[in-house]
Amino acid sequence: MNNTKTTEIKLRYIPDGGEKTEIAFSPDGAFENDCFEVLAQISGARRTVKVKTKRPVTLEKCTQRGVYKADFGDLAFINGYQSWTKTKEYFLSEKERDVKRLPKPLLRTYAFDRYGDATFFDYDRNILHGYDVFYVKSGSGKSGSFIFNANYKNAYLVIVIDRSTGEVSLRNELDGLRLNAGEEFVVSDYYIEDYEKGKRLFEEFFPKKDVKKILGYTSWYNYYQDIDEKIILRDLDALDSRFELFQIDDGYETFVGDWLDVDKNKFPNGLSDIVKKIHSRGMQAGIWLAPLVAEEKSKVFNEHRDWFLFDGETVKCGSNWSGFYAINLSVPNARAYVSECLGYYMGLGFDFFKLDFLYASSLAPCGGRTRSMVAEDAYAFLRETLKDKTILGCGATIFNAADKFDYLRIGPDVSLKFDDVWFMRFMHNERISTKTTLQNTVFRSLFNGRLFGNDPDVFLLRDDNIGLSARQRRALITLNALFGSVLMTSDDLGKYDAAKNRTLDNALELYRNATVTDFCRQHDIIRIFYTLGGEEKTLEYDTKKGVLL
Protein backbone atom coordinates (compact mmCIF):
# COMPACT_ATOMS: atom_id res chain seq x y z
CA MET A 1 0.00 0.00 0.00
CA ASN A 2 1.35 3.44 -0.91
CA ASN A 3 2.59 5.70 1.90
CA THR A 4 2.35 2.94 4.54
CA LYS A 5 5.06 2.63 7.17
CA THR A 6 5.88 -0.05 9.74
CA THR A 7 6.91 1.84 12.87
CA GLU A 8 7.53 0.80 16.45
CA ILE A 9 4.70 0.47 18.94
CA LYS A 10 4.74 2.08 22.38
CA LEU A 11 2.79 0.86 25.42
CA ARG A 12 2.36 3.03 28.50
CA TYR A 13 1.44 1.47 31.85
CA ILE A 14 1.89 1.65 35.63
CA PRO A 15 2.98 -1.53 37.46
CA ASP A 16 1.63 -1.99 40.96
CA GLY A 17 3.92 -0.17 43.34
CA GLY A 18 5.85 1.36 40.47
CA GLU A 19 5.97 4.46 38.31
CA LYS A 20 4.52 5.23 34.90
CA THR A 21 6.55 3.33 32.32
CA GLU A 22 6.67 3.24 28.52
CA ILE A 23 8.07 0.38 26.46
CA ALA A 24 8.69 0.22 22.72
CA PHE A 25 8.67 -2.86 20.51
CA SER A 26 8.43 -4.01 16.90
CA PRO A 27 4.96 -4.36 15.30
CA ASP A 28 5.87 -7.88 14.19
CA GLY A 29 7.64 -9.91 16.85
CA ALA A 30 7.86 -10.83 20.53
CA PHE A 31 8.96 -8.71 23.47
CA GLU A 32 9.34 -9.49 27.18
CA ASN A 33 10.17 -7.63 30.38
CA ASP A 34 9.40 -8.06 34.09
CA CYS A 35 5.74 -7.02 33.55
CA PHE A 36 4.70 -8.46 30.17
CA GLU A 37 5.05 -10.99 27.49
CA VAL A 38 4.10 -9.12 24.30
CA LEU A 39 3.28 -10.68 20.95
CA ALA A 40 2.87 -8.29 18.00
CA GLN A 41 1.86 -9.72 14.64
CA ILE A 42 1.32 -8.53 11.08
CA SER A 43 -0.83 -10.91 9.04
CA GLY A 44 -1.70 -9.41 5.68
CA ALA A 45 -3.71 -6.27 6.37
CA ARG A 46 -4.31 -7.18 10.03
CA ARG A 47 -2.05 -5.95 12.84
CA THR A 48 -2.44 -7.30 16.37
CA VAL A 49 -0.81 -6.77 19.76
CA LYS A 50 -1.49 -9.16 22.65
CA VAL A 51 -0.07 -9.02 26.15
CA LYS A 52 0.18 -11.50 29.01
CA THR A 53 0.97 -9.94 32.37
CA LYS A 54 3.49 -11.21 34.89
CA ARG A 55 2.34 -8.85 37.64
CA PRO A 56 -0.63 -6.52 38.23
CA VAL A 57 -0.55 -3.43 36.01
CA THR A 58 -2.77 -0.54 34.96
CA LEU A 59 -2.61 0.32 31.27
CA GLU A 60 -2.93 3.81 29.81
CA LYS A 61 -2.50 3.70 26.05
CA CYS A 62 -0.83 1.93 23.16
CA THR A 63 0.41 4.14 20.31
CA GLN A 64 1.93 3.81 16.87
CA ARG A 65 3.09 6.81 14.86
CA GLY A 66 3.33 7.27 11.13
CA VAL A 67 1.30 4.32 9.85
CA TYR A 68 0.34 6.37 6.76
CA LYS A 69 1.10 9.74 5.23
CA ALA A 70 -1.65 11.73 3.53
CA ASP A 71 -0.96 14.38 0.93
CA PHE A 72 -2.40 17.88 0.79
CA GLY A 73 -5.47 17.71 -1.40
CA ASP A 74 -6.46 14.32 0.06
CA LEU A 75 -9.74 13.89 1.91
CA ALA A 76 -9.59 12.24 5.35
CA PHE A 77 -12.70 10.71 6.91
CA ILE A 78 -12.86 11.67 10.59
CA ASN A 79 -15.48 9.67 12.50
CA GLY A 80 -16.61 11.51 15.62
CA TYR A 81 -16.69 10.00 19.10
CA GLN A 82 -20.44 9.46 19.49
CA SER A 83 -23.73 9.74 17.60
CA TRP A 84 -23.90 13.52 17.69
CA THR A 85 -20.23 14.32 17.06
CA LYS A 86 -19.44 16.16 13.84
CA THR A 87 -18.28 13.66 11.21
CA LYS A 88 -17.18 14.28 7.64
CA GLU A 89 -14.38 14.07 5.11
CA TYR A 90 -11.84 16.79 5.93
CA PHE A 91 -9.19 18.53 3.91
CA LEU A 92 -6.01 19.01 5.95
CA SER A 93 -6.60 22.77 5.81
CA GLU A 94 -9.77 22.37 7.89
CA LYS A 95 -9.78 22.42 11.69
CA GLU A 96 -11.81 20.65 14.37
CA ARG A 97 -13.35 22.65 17.19
CA ASP A 98 -11.80 22.39 20.66
CA VAL A 99 -14.52 22.93 23.26
CA LYS A 100 -11.90 23.48 25.96
CA ARG A 101 -10.99 26.80 24.35
CA LEU A 102 -14.30 28.15 25.64
CA PRO A 103 -14.16 30.29 28.80
CA LYS A 104 -13.94 28.13 31.92
CA PRO A 105 -17.03 29.71 33.57
CA LEU A 106 -19.05 28.70 30.49
CA LEU A 107 -17.77 25.12 30.73
CA ARG A 108 -18.51 24.96 34.46
CA THR A 109 -22.04 26.25 33.96
CA TYR A 110 -23.06 24.28 30.87
CA ALA A 111 -20.65 21.31 30.89
CA PHE A 112 -20.23 21.51 27.11
CA ASP A 113 -17.04 19.45 27.44
CA ARG A 114 -18.98 16.41 28.71
CA TYR A 115 -20.90 15.56 25.52
CA GLY A 116 -17.88 14.25 23.63
CA ASP A 117 -14.31 13.16 24.35
CA ALA A 118 -12.85 16.44 25.62
CA THR A 119 -12.40 15.15 29.18
CA PHE A 120 -9.95 12.46 28.09
CA PHE A 121 -8.52 13.49 24.71
CA ASP A 122 -6.06 16.37 24.40
CA TYR A 123 -7.24 18.53 21.50
CA ASP A 124 -4.64 20.33 19.40
CA ARG A 125 -5.33 22.82 16.61
CA ASN A 126 -2.68 21.07 14.47
CA ILE A 127 -4.44 17.70 14.37
CA LEU A 128 -7.67 16.01 13.36
CA HIS A 129 -8.81 12.88 15.19
CA GLY A 130 -11.54 10.27 14.93
CA TYR A 131 -12.60 6.89 16.25
CA ASP A 132 -12.48 3.26 15.10
CA VAL A 133 -12.66 3.81 11.33
CA PHE A 134 -10.69 6.15 9.09
CA TYR A 135 -9.96 6.50 5.42
CA VAL A 136 -8.08 8.72 3.01
CA LYS A 137 -9.34 9.37 -0.49
CA SER A 138 -6.34 10.48 -2.46
CA GLY A 139 -6.51 13.64 -4.54
CA SER A 140 -3.29 12.81 -6.36
CA GLY A 141 -4.11 9.47 -7.97
CA LYS A 142 -2.66 7.32 -5.18
CA SER A 143 -4.52 4.41 -3.64
CA GLY A 144 -5.38 6.10 -0.35
CA SER A 145 -5.88 4.24 2.92
CA PHE A 146 -8.58 2.54 4.97
CA ILE A 147 -8.15 1.66 8.67
CA PHE A 148 -10.69 0.11 11.04
CA ASN A 149 -10.72 -1.27 14.56
CA ALA A 150 -11.35 -5.00 15.04
CA ASN A 151 -10.76 -4.61 18.80
CA TYR A 152 -13.56 -2.13 19.51
CA LYS A 153 -15.06 -4.26 22.28
CA ASN A 154 -11.83 -3.88 24.26
CA ALA A 155 -10.56 -0.41 23.38
CA TYR A 156 -11.34 2.53 21.13
CA LEU A 157 -8.89 3.12 18.31
CA VAL A 158 -8.18 6.84 18.04
CA ILE A 159 -6.82 7.82 14.62
CA VAL A 160 -4.87 11.09 14.62
CA ILE A 161 -3.70 12.97 11.53
CA ASP A 162 -1.20 15.81 11.68
CA ARG A 163 -2.60 18.66 9.58
CA SER A 164 0.83 20.06 8.76
CA THR A 165 2.55 16.83 7.67
CA GLY A 166 -0.29 14.41 6.84
CA GLU A 167 1.20 11.81 9.20
CA VAL A 168 -1.37 9.35 10.55
CA SER A 169 -0.86 7.87 14.03
CA LEU A 170 -2.89 5.44 16.12
CA ARG A 171 -3.76 5.31 19.80
CA ASN A 172 -5.59 2.49 21.58
CA GLU A 173 -7.56 4.11 24.41
CA LEU A 174 -6.75 1.89 27.44
CA ASP A 175 -6.96 4.45 30.24
CA GLY A 176 -7.73 2.79 33.57
CA LEU A 177 -7.54 -0.83 32.39
CA ARG A 178 -6.52 -3.02 35.29
CA LEU A 179 -4.89 -6.38 34.55
CA ASN A 180 -3.94 -8.94 37.19
CA ALA A 181 -0.94 -11.22 36.97
CA GLY A 182 -1.39 -13.95 34.37
CA GLU A 183 -4.13 -12.16 32.41
CA GLU A 184 -4.09 -12.07 28.62
CA PHE A 185 -5.49 -9.08 26.75
CA VAL A 186 -5.70 -7.92 23.15
CA VAL A 187 -4.33 -4.39 23.30
CA SER A 188 -4.61 -3.58 19.60
CA ASP A 189 -6.19 -5.26 16.58
CA TYR A 190 -6.81 -3.29 13.42
CA TYR A 191 -6.82 -3.56 9.63
CA ILE A 192 -4.93 -1.20 7.33
CA GLU A 193 -5.06 -1.33 3.54
CA ASP A 194 -5.42 0.96 0.58
CA TYR A 195 -8.84 2.59 0.28
CA GLU A 196 -10.60 0.15 -2.04
CA LYS A 197 -9.20 -3.05 -0.50
CA GLY A 198 -9.72 -1.73 3.03
CA LYS A 199 -13.31 -0.81 2.31
CA ARG A 200 -13.95 -4.36 1.07
CA LEU A 201 -12.35 -5.78 4.23
CA PHE A 202 -14.59 -3.53 6.33
CA GLU A 203 -17.65 -4.78 4.44
CA GLU A 204 -16.57 -8.39 4.97
CA PHE A 205 -15.97 -7.79 8.68
CA PHE A 206 -19.40 -6.15 9.03
CA PRO A 207 -21.58 -7.99 6.49
CA LYS A 208 -24.92 -6.58 5.35
CA LYS A 209 -27.86 -7.13 7.71
CA ASP A 210 -31.54 -7.40 6.90
CA VAL A 211 -32.56 -3.99 8.25
CA LYS A 212 -36.22 -3.02 7.96
CA LYS A 213 -36.77 0.57 6.90
CA ILE A 214 -39.35 2.32 9.04
CA LEU A 215 -41.47 5.47 8.62
CA GLY A 216 -42.58 7.12 11.81
CA TYR A 217 -43.55 10.09 13.93
CA THR A 218 -41.81 11.50 17.01
CA SER A 219 -43.19 14.28 19.18
CA TRP A 220 -39.87 16.02 19.93
CA TYR A 221 -39.14 18.41 17.06
CA ASN A 222 -42.34 20.40 17.28
CA TYR A 223 -43.21 20.47 20.97
CA TYR A 224 -40.00 19.36 22.70
CA GLN A 225 -40.95 18.72 26.37
CA ASP A 226 -44.26 20.58 26.04
CA ILE A 227 -46.39 17.54 25.22
CA ASP A 228 -49.59 16.29 26.77
CA GLU A 229 -52.26 13.70 26.11
CA LYS A 230 -54.27 16.03 23.86
CA ILE A 231 -51.32 16.84 21.57
CA ILE A 232 -50.24 13.21 21.34
CA LEU A 233 -53.71 11.93 20.45
CA ARG A 234 -54.30 14.75 17.95
CA ASP A 235 -51.06 14.04 16.09
CA LEU A 236 -51.74 10.31 16.19
CA ASP A 237 -55.14 10.88 14.56
CA ALA A 238 -53.48 12.92 11.79
CA LEU A 239 -51.25 10.06 10.62
CA ASP A 240 -52.30 7.88 7.70
CA SER A 241 -51.56 4.32 6.61
CA ARG A 242 -48.10 5.26 5.31
CA PHE A 243 -46.83 5.45 8.89
CA GLU A 244 -45.58 2.44 10.85
CA LEU A 245 -44.40 3.98 14.13
CA PHE A 246 -45.64 6.57 16.61
CA GLN A 247 -43.05 7.52 19.23
CA ILE A 248 -43.67 9.59 22.36
CA ASP A 249 -40.53 11.57 23.14
CA ASP A 250 -39.25 13.43 26.21
CA GLY A 251 -41.79 15.32 28.32
CA TYR A 252 -44.13 12.61 29.60
CA GLU A 253 -42.07 11.91 32.77
CA THR A 254 -41.90 14.12 35.87
CA PHE A 255 -38.10 14.30 35.80
CA VAL A 256 -35.48 12.54 33.72
CA GLY A 257 -34.49 9.48 35.73
CA ASP A 258 -37.84 9.12 37.49
CA TRP A 259 -39.18 6.88 34.74
CA LEU A 260 -41.81 5.24 36.92
CA ASP A 261 -43.48 8.63 37.50
CA VAL A 262 -45.53 9.68 34.49
CA ASP A 263 -46.61 13.35 34.76
CA LYS A 264 -50.27 13.14 35.80
CA ASN A 265 -50.94 16.76 34.88
CA LYS A 266 -49.94 16.11 31.26
CA PHE A 267 -51.15 12.53 31.03
CA PRO A 268 -53.98 12.11 33.56
CA ASN A 269 -54.91 8.73 32.08
CA GLY A 270 -51.35 7.45 31.91
CA LEU A 271 -49.85 5.94 28.78
CA SER A 272 -51.49 2.53 28.57
CA ASP A 273 -54.58 3.68 26.64
CA ILE A 274 -52.40 5.67 24.23
CA VAL A 275 -50.38 2.55 23.48
CA LYS A 276 -53.60 0.67 22.72
CA LYS A 277 -54.75 3.44 20.37
CA ILE A 278 -51.42 3.39 18.55
CA HIS A 279 -51.70 -0.37 18.12
CA SER A 280 -55.29 -0.04 16.93
CA ARG A 281 -53.95 2.10 14.08
CA GLY A 282 -51.61 -0.72 13.05
CA MET A 283 -48.46 1.10 14.23
CA GLN A 284 -45.66 0.27 16.60
CA ALA A 285 -45.77 2.22 19.86
CA GLY A 286 -42.48 3.94 20.65
CA ILE A 287 -41.18 5.58 23.82
CA TRP A 288 -38.13 7.73 24.57
CA LEU A 289 -35.96 7.14 27.63
CA ALA A 290 -32.49 8.12 28.79
CA PRO A 291 -32.01 5.07 31.02
CA LEU A 292 -28.36 5.63 31.98
CA VAL A 293 -28.72 9.16 33.38
CA ALA A 294 -30.83 11.17 35.80
CA GLU A 295 -31.23 14.89 36.21
CA GLU A 296 -30.35 16.83 39.34
CA LYS A 297 -33.99 17.46 40.31
CA SER A 298 -34.99 13.80 40.09
CA LYS A 299 -35.85 11.69 43.11
CA VAL A 300 -33.50 8.94 42.02
CA PHE A 301 -30.52 11.30 41.98
CA ASN A 302 -31.32 12.87 45.33
CA GLU A 303 -32.26 9.66 47.14
CA HIS A 304 -29.67 7.28 45.67
CA ARG A 305 -26.50 9.28 45.08
CA ASP A 306 -24.48 6.08 45.55
CA TRP A 307 -25.99 4.72 42.31
CA PHE A 308 -24.09 7.27 40.23
CA LEU A 309 -20.67 7.19 38.60
CA PHE A 310 -18.02 8.85 40.73
CA ASP A 311 -14.61 10.00 39.47
CA GLY A 312 -13.41 12.40 42.15
CA GLU A 313 -16.93 13.84 42.02
CA THR A 314 -20.26 12.67 40.70
CA VAL A 315 -19.84 12.47 36.92
CA LYS A 316 -21.87 15.22 35.24
CA CYS A 317 -22.81 14.51 31.63
CA GLY A 318 -24.11 17.87 30.43
CA SER A 319 -26.49 20.74 31.13
CA ASN A 320 -29.77 19.44 29.70
CA TRP A 321 -32.75 19.72 32.03
CA SER A 322 -31.41 20.65 35.50
CA GLY A 323 -28.02 19.12 34.72
CA PHE A 324 -27.69 15.34 34.55
CA TYR A 325 -25.44 12.59 35.84
CA ALA A 326 -24.32 9.08 34.85
CA ILE A 327 -25.78 6.00 36.49
CA ASN A 328 -23.18 3.39 37.46
CA LEU A 329 -24.40 0.02 36.21
CA SER A 330 -21.74 -1.78 38.25
CA VAL A 331 -23.86 -0.96 41.32
CA PRO A 332 -26.38 -3.85 41.57
CA ASN A 333 -29.27 -1.71 42.85
CA ALA A 334 -28.73 0.85 40.08
CA ARG A 335 -28.70 -1.90 37.47
CA ALA A 336 -31.87 -3.37 38.94
CA TYR A 337 -33.57 0.04 38.84
CA VAL A 338 -32.79 0.57 35.16
CA SER A 339 -34.08 -2.93 34.43
CA GLU A 340 -37.27 -2.21 36.39
CA CYS A 341 -37.89 1.01 34.46
CA LEU A 342 -37.43 -0.61 31.06
CA GLY A 343 -39.62 -3.51 32.16
CA TYR A 344 -42.37 -1.08 33.16
CA TYR A 345 -42.61 0.31 29.63
CA MET A 346 -42.44 -3.13 28.10
CA GLY A 347 -45.35 -4.02 30.36
CA LEU A 348 -47.33 -1.07 29.00
CA GLY A 349 -46.98 -2.59 25.54
CA PHE A 350 -44.33 -0.38 23.94
CA ASP A 351 -42.60 -2.06 20.99
CA PHE A 352 -39.94 0.52 20.09
CA PHE A 353 -37.46 2.08 22.51
CA LYS A 354 -35.44 5.17 21.69
CA LEU A 355 -32.63 5.13 24.26
CA ASP A 356 -30.79 8.43 24.50
CA PHE A 357 -27.68 9.99 26.11
CA LEU A 358 -25.97 6.60 26.18
CA TYR A 359 -22.46 8.07 25.98
CA ALA A 360 -22.84 8.77 29.71
CA SER A 361 -22.00 5.18 30.59
CA SER A 362 -18.38 5.56 29.52
CA LEU A 363 -17.51 9.15 30.39
CA ALA A 364 -15.10 7.78 32.99
CA PRO A 365 -13.36 4.40 33.25
CA CYS A 366 -15.07 2.20 35.80
CA GLY A 367 -14.06 -0.92 37.70
CA GLY A 368 -10.66 -1.24 36.05
CA ARG A 369 -12.16 -1.46 32.56
CA THR A 370 -11.65 0.70 29.50
CA ARG A 371 -14.34 3.13 28.38
CA SER A 372 -15.16 0.82 25.49
CA MET A 373 -15.58 -2.18 27.79
CA VAL A 374 -17.93 -0.17 30.02
CA ALA A 375 -20.01 0.88 27.00
CA GLU A 376 -20.07 -2.71 25.70
CA ASP A 377 -21.45 -3.92 29.02
CA ALA A 378 -24.02 -1.12 29.23
CA TYR A 379 -25.35 -1.54 25.71
CA ALA A 380 -25.42 -5.34 25.98
CA PHE A 381 -27.37 -4.97 29.24
CA LEU A 382 -29.94 -2.76 27.51
CA ARG A 383 -30.34 -5.28 24.71
CA GLU A 384 -30.65 -8.20 27.13
CA THR A 385 -33.22 -6.35 29.22
CA LEU A 386 -35.38 -5.31 26.27
CA LYS A 387 -35.23 -8.77 24.71
CA ASP A 388 -36.74 -8.67 21.20
CA LYS A 389 -38.01 -5.08 21.36
CA THR A 390 -36.76 -2.68 18.70
CA ILE A 391 -34.02 -0.34 19.97
CA LEU A 392 -33.00 2.98 18.45
CA GLY A 393 -29.82 4.13 20.18
CA CYS A 394 -28.92 7.80 20.38
CA GLY A 395 -26.00 9.73 21.81
CA ALA A 396 -24.03 6.47 21.80
CA THR A 397 -20.47 5.48 20.92
CA ILE A 398 -20.72 4.09 17.41
CA PHE A 399 -19.01 0.71 17.24
CA ASN A 400 -20.29 -0.38 20.67
CA ALA A 401 -23.82 -0.17 19.25
CA ALA A 402 -23.10 -2.80 16.58
CA ASP A 403 -25.14 -6.00 17.05
CA LYS A 404 -26.94 -4.51 20.04
CA PHE A 405 -29.21 -1.83 18.62
CA ASP A 406 -31.44 -2.16 15.58
CA TYR A 407 -30.94 1.49 14.66
CA LEU A 408 -28.58 4.25 15.73
CA ARG A 409 -28.71 8.01 15.38
CA ILE A 410 -25.65 9.00 13.39
CA GLY A 411 -25.76 12.80 13.71
CA PRO A 412 -26.76 15.57 16.11
CA ASP A 413 -30.32 16.79 16.50
CA VAL A 414 -31.89 18.66 13.61
CA SER A 415 -32.09 22.38 14.39
CA LEU A 416 -35.06 24.53 13.39
CA LYS A 417 -32.56 27.01 11.91
CA PHE A 418 -30.07 25.52 9.46
CA ASP A 419 -26.99 25.90 11.70
CA ASP A 420 -28.84 26.85 14.89
CA VAL A 421 -28.45 30.26 16.56
CA TRP A 422 -25.16 32.03 15.86
CA PHE A 423 -23.59 31.81 19.33
CA MET A 424 -24.02 28.02 19.52
CA ARG A 425 -21.72 27.66 16.50
CA PHE A 426 -18.78 28.35 18.82
CA MET A 427 -19.69 25.53 21.20
CA HIS A 428 -19.15 21.76 21.28
CA ASN A 429 -18.92 19.30 18.39
CA GLU A 430 -22.15 17.60 19.50
CA ARG A 431 -24.39 20.70 19.37
CA ILE A 432 -27.70 20.58 17.50
CA SER A 433 -27.31 21.55 13.85
CA THR A 434 -29.13 20.56 10.68
CA LYS A 435 -26.03 21.61 8.75
CA THR A 436 -23.87 19.15 10.67
CA THR A 437 -26.33 16.29 10.83
CA LEU A 438 -26.87 16.26 7.06
CA GLN A 439 -23.14 15.85 6.51
CA ASN A 440 -23.06 13.07 9.11
CA THR A 441 -25.94 11.43 7.23
CA VAL A 442 -23.87 11.22 4.05
CA PHE A 443 -20.43 10.46 5.46
CA ARG A 444 -21.55 7.87 8.01
CA SER A 445 -23.50 5.95 5.38
CA LEU A 446 -20.83 3.22 5.43
CA PHE A 447 -22.38 2.01 8.72
CA ASN A 448 -25.93 1.72 7.38
CA GLY A 449 -27.16 -1.86 7.20
CA ARG A 450 -23.86 -3.20 8.55
CA LEU A 451 -23.40 -2.07 12.13
CA PHE A 452 -27.10 -1.10 12.44
CA GLY A 453 -29.70 0.86 10.50
CA ASN A 454 -28.79 4.56 10.30
CA ASP A 455 -31.17 7.11 11.81
CA PRO A 456 -30.44 10.49 10.19
CA ASP A 457 -32.99 12.26 12.44
CA VAL A 458 -36.22 13.89 11.33
CA PHE A 459 -37.47 15.64 8.22
CA LEU A 460 -39.65 18.73 8.65
CA LEU A 461 -41.94 20.03 5.89
CA ARG A 462 -44.23 22.26 7.96
CA ASP A 463 -44.40 26.04 7.46
CA ASP A 464 -44.97 27.00 11.11
CA ASN A 465 -42.45 26.83 13.98
CA ILE A 466 -39.55 26.43 11.55
CA GLY A 467 -36.58 28.51 10.41
CA LEU A 468 -35.48 26.26 7.54
CA SER A 469 -36.25 27.54 4.05
CA ALA A 470 -38.41 25.48 1.70
CA ARG A 471 -35.30 24.43 -0.25
CA GLN A 472 -33.50 23.40 2.93
CA ARG A 473 -36.52 21.34 4.02
CA ARG A 474 -36.54 19.62 0.62
CA ALA A 475 -32.83 18.80 0.93
CA LEU A 476 -33.38 17.45 4.44
CA ILE A 477 -36.11 14.99 3.46
CA THR A 478 -34.28 13.97 0.27
CA LEU A 479 -30.95 13.12 1.93
CA ASN A 480 -32.69 11.39 4.83
CA ALA A 481 -34.66 9.27 2.38
CA LEU A 482 -31.60 8.35 0.32
CA PHE A 483 -29.25 7.51 3.17
CA GLY A 484 -31.39 6.47 6.14
CA SER A 485 -33.07 3.35 7.48
CA VAL A 486 -35.33 5.45 9.71
CA LEU A 487 -37.51 8.24 8.31
CA MET A 488 -39.24 10.27 11.00
CA THR A 489 -41.04 13.58 11.37
CA SER A 490 -42.57 15.66 14.15
CA ASP A 491 -44.97 17.53 11.88
CA ASP A 492 -48.72 17.58 12.46
CA LEU A 493 -49.67 15.69 9.30
CA GLY A 494 -53.19 17.06 9.55
CA LYS A 495 -51.80 20.40 8.34
CA TYR A 496 -50.16 18.99 5.20
CA ASP A 497 -51.60 20.25 1.92
CA ALA A 498 -51.51 18.33 -1.36
CA ALA A 499 -48.06 19.69 -2.26
CA LYS A 500 -46.50 18.55 1.01
CA ASN A 501 -48.07 15.11 0.68
CA ARG A 502 -46.62 14.84 -2.84
CA THR A 503 -43.19 15.81 -1.47
CA LEU A 504 -43.51 13.09 1.16
CA ASP A 505 -44.63 10.53 -1.43
CA ASN A 506 -41.67 11.41 -3.67
CA ALA A 507 -39.31 11.01 -0.72
CA LEU A 508 -40.88 7.65 0.12
CA GLU A 509 -40.21 6.50 -3.44
CA LEU A 510 -36.53 7.28 -2.88
CA TYR A 511 -36.61 5.75 0.59
CA ARG A 512 -38.10 2.44 -0.55
CA ASN A 513 -36.55 2.03 -3.99
CA ALA A 514 -33.42 4.14 -4.55
CA THR A 515 -29.90 2.82 -3.98
CA VAL A 516 -26.97 5.17 -3.41
CA THR A 517 -23.97 3.90 -5.37
CA ASP A 518 -21.39 6.55 -4.47
CA PHE A 519 -20.78 10.11 -3.34
CA CYS A 520 -17.87 12.51 -3.52
CA ARG A 521 -17.03 15.77 -1.81
CA GLN A 522 -15.93 18.66 -4.01
CA HIS A 523 -15.21 21.51 -1.60
CA ASP A 524 -18.65 22.67 -0.33
CA ILE A 525 -20.58 20.42 -2.73
CA ILE A 526 -21.37 16.73 -2.28
CA ARG A 527 -22.24 14.88 -5.49
CA ILE A 528 -24.48 11.87 -4.86
CA PHE A 529 -24.95 9.04 -7.34
CA TYR A 530 -27.91 6.68 -7.05
CA THR A 531 -30.14 4.37 -9.05
CA LEU A 532 -33.93 4.47 -9.15
CA GLY A 533 -36.14 2.37 -11.39
CA GLY A 534 -33.14 1.10 -13.32
CA GLU A 535 -31.91 4.62 -14.10
CA GLU A 536 -28.67 6.18 -12.87
CA LYS A 537 -29.22 9.58 -11.29
CA THR A 538 -27.09 12.32 -9.75
CA LEU A 539 -27.83 15.18 -7.41
CA GLU A 540 -25.66 17.86 -5.83
CA TYR A 541 -25.97 19.11 -2.27
CA ASP A 542 -24.51 22.44 -1.14
CA THR A 543 -23.29 21.84 2.43
CA LYS A 544 -22.82 25.55 3.12
CA LYS A 545 -26.31 26.66 2.07
CA GLY A 546 -28.15 23.41 2.84
CA VAL A 547 -29.88 23.15 -0.53
CA LEU A 548 -29.96 20.85 -3.53
CA LEU A 549 -28.58 22.41 -6.71
Image (cartoon, rainbow, N blue to C red):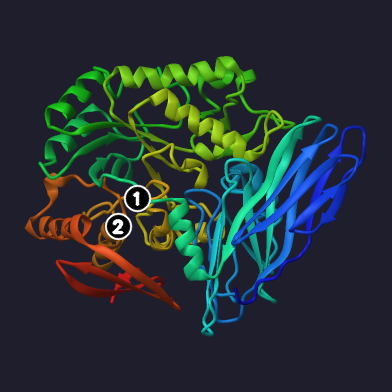
Q: Is residue 323 visible?
A: no
- Residue that sits furthest to the bottom in the current view: 140
- Percent of width and height locating residue 217: 24, 42
Q: Residue at coordinates 67% horizontally, 54% vertically from top-left? A: 100
Earlier along the polypeptide chain: callout 1 or callout 2?
1
Is 297 on the left-hand or right-hand side of 49? left
- Report, in whole angstroms, how far the alpha carbon at label 1 lies from the one at label 2: 8 Å
Of 19 and 273, the residue lying toward us: 19
- Percent of width and height locating residue 308: 61, 25
Disc 1: which residue? 457
The amino acid sitting under disc 1 is: Asp
- Percent of width and height locating residue 259: 42, 22
Q: Is residue 439 visible?
A: yes
The amino acid sitting under disc 2 is: Asn
Position of the N terminus by quadrant: bottom right
Disc 2: which residue? 480
Is 510 on the left-hand or right-hand side of 484? left
Cβ–Cβ under 8 Å for marks 1 and 2: yes
Dot 1: few (<14), some (14–19), or many (≥20) neighbours within 10 Å?
A: many
